[in-house]
Image (cartoon, grey):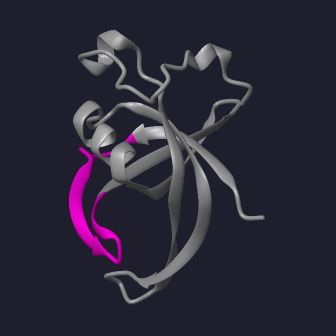
């Protein structure tokens, strides 16, 4: 089973696009996030790409913006790519099954959309 949970902040505004599928056009939203791991006074940041589909994609594009905190879960792959310096690296990419908005209402600029749940980060088991 390939399942992971990422909790992080968007490093840029969501990028919404439409793709053709066998069942018709589908909305896709690409999210870039920074995942900060703190140990004592040290902070390690891991960057990941999260892809969200259909209604959730539209909600993410509408209600999220750079700096907002999210929790996303789904399947993850390490995709190799060659950097500008010629060295090979791996990019973490998640196909999200669900995304939760963790920023408060005052930060999000509106109510939480239908089908999404506002989560208090202090209630998170992580």
How many numbered marks have been drawn onto this rendered protein structure? Answer: 0
Residue at (58% x, 73% y) in the render: 78
In this image, 6 relative to 64: left or right? right
What is the x, y in percent for residue 36?
55, 40
Residue at (30% x, 34% y) in the render: 64
> Going by the picture, which residue comes out furthest to the top?
106
Most frequent secondary structure within the magenta stretch? strand
Q: Quadrant of the C terminus?
A: top right
Q: Which residues are magenta?
A: 10-27
**Towards the viewer: 93 or 22:** 22
> Going by the picture, which residue comes out furthest to the front?
23
The quadrant in which residue 104 appears is: top left
Residue at (31% x, 16% y) in the render: 107
In this image, 100 relative to 65: left or right? right
> Going by the picture, which residue comes out furthest to the right?
1
**Towards the viewer: 115 or 50:** 115
What is the x, y in percent for residue 14?
27, 47
Whether residue 126 appears in magenta in the rendering, the answer is: no
In the displayed structure, 36 sits above or below 78; it is above
Whether residue 26 appears in magenta in the rendering, the answer is: yes
> Going by the picture, which residue comes out furthest to the bottom?
86
The quadrant in which residue 10 appears is: top left
Residue at (59% x, 71% y) in the render: 77
In the displayed structure, 29 sits above or below 82; it is above
Q: Quadrant of the N terminus?
A: bottom right
The quadrant in which residue 83 appears is: bottom left
In this image, 48 relative to 76: left or right? left
**Towards the viewer: 32 or 51:** 51
In the displayed structure, 112 sits above or below 56; it is above
What is the x, y in percent for residue 30?
33, 56
In the displayed structure, 37 sits above or below 92; it is above
């Amino acid at each position: 089973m390939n399942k992971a949970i990422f909790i992080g902040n968007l490093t840029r505004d969501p990028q919404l696009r439409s793709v053709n599928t066998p069942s018709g056009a589908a909305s896709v939203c690409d999210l870039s996030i920074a995942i900060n791991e703190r140990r004592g006074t040290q902070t390690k940041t891991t960057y990941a790409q999260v892809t969200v589909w259909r209604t959730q994609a539209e909600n993410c594009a509408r209600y999220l913006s750079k700096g907002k905190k999210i929790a996303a879960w789904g399947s993850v792959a390490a995709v190799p790519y060659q950097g500008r310096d010629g060295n090979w690296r791996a990019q973490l990419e998640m196909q999200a099954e669900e995304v939760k908005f963790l920023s408060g209402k005052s930060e999000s600029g509106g109510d939480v959309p239908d089908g999404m749940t506002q989560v208090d980060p202090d209630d998170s088991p992580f």
